[in-house]
Image (cartoon, rainbow, N blue to C red):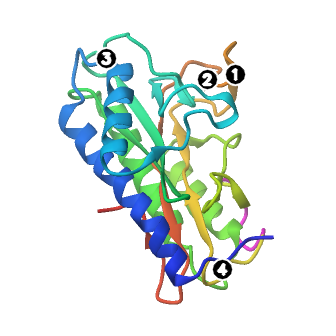
Amino acid sequence: MTELKTEEEIGCIRKAGRVVAECHQAIARRIAPGVTTLEIDRFVERMMVERGARPAQKGYRGYPFATCASVNEIVCHGFPDTVPLQQGDIVTIDMVADVDGWKADSAWTYTIGKGSPQVEYLLKTAKQALFRGIQQALPGRRIGDIGQAVRQHAESSGFAVVPSFVGHGIGRDIHEPPEVSHVARAGSGGMLRDGTVLTIEPILTIGRPEVWIGSDGWTAQTRDGSWSAQFEHTVAVTAAGPVILTAL
């Protein structure tokens, strides 16, 4: 059962979302060739703590870091490390902030310097696909309406959507019902209602969408080595329309 949130509870999630948004804004200013994802991870953890938040991913099911850092062909859940980012790389930084027990989740893919035209088009399309999905987050629509909007935009642009990872409800817990498939058919899945809060987080890839999981049990990467990009927001479904809770 999807737990509907009150207006006050949505406001609590928004506080956590603002911390996440401020972290992403700060990352965009400092990420560059030579910076490591472990430096970014430590910076994010400090920034969250300074704002009265807790990095909710750290310790979740044994995950050891405050962020996930997924470079190039890493699809998601990559471990931050000490390898310097290089000109032309792309990296997705995914984080969850907890403020007073309420959580918000957002991922963003960054280009290190300037990427190739194909990579820049991938990022542009992935971001557009996210917002196509958000437009469907309305009372009375179905979960599948989000997925179809995402998949149609991705495939019409020549990219594939990775089906192995889904969006999810969020609130007191990181993962709550419902699951949000980004490849579903319109009209399928549960009905969205006023007060539903969920993440929409499609992952698009240049090549095939199949993935494999590394020996750490977390890191997912494309089987064919193709690069991928992900953009994610936490969104509230309201009668007035979708409200992005992880935007400034």
Residue 35, by quadrant, is top left
Query: Residue 99: x percent and y percent?
Result: 46, 57
* Tag 1 near tag 3, CB within 8 Å: no
Sequence-wise first label, 2 or 3: 3
Within 10 Å of the Cα at label 1, are there few (<14), some (14-19), or many (20+) other Cα atoms?
A: some
- Which amino acid, by three-letter code, is at mark 2? Thr
Query: Residue 179: x percent and y percent?
Result: 72, 58
* Tag 1 near tag 4, CB within 8 Å: no
Which residue, given by chain and number where applicable, does mark 4 sit on? 141
Q: Considering only vertical position in the picture, is 53 above or below 30? A: below
* 171 and 91: which is toward the camera: 171
Which residue, given by chain and number where applicable, does mark 3 sit on? 85
Which residue, given by chain and number where applicable, does mark 1 sit on? 213
Sequence-wise first label, 2 or 1: 1
Sequence-wise first label, 1 or 4: 4
Which residue, given by chain and number where applicable, does mark 2 sit on? 219
User: Which residue is pictured at 62% across the width and 51% down the height?
Assistant: 174
Within 10 Å of the Cα at label 3, are there few (<14), some (14-19), or many (20+) other Cα atoms?
A: many
Within 10 Å of the Cα at label 2, are there few (<14), some (14-19), or many (20+) other Cα atoms?
A: some
Which quadrant does the N terminus fall into? bottom right
The magenta segment is 183-189
Q: CA distance from mark 2 to mark 3?
A: 17 Å
Query: Residue 85: x percent and y percent?
Result: 31, 17
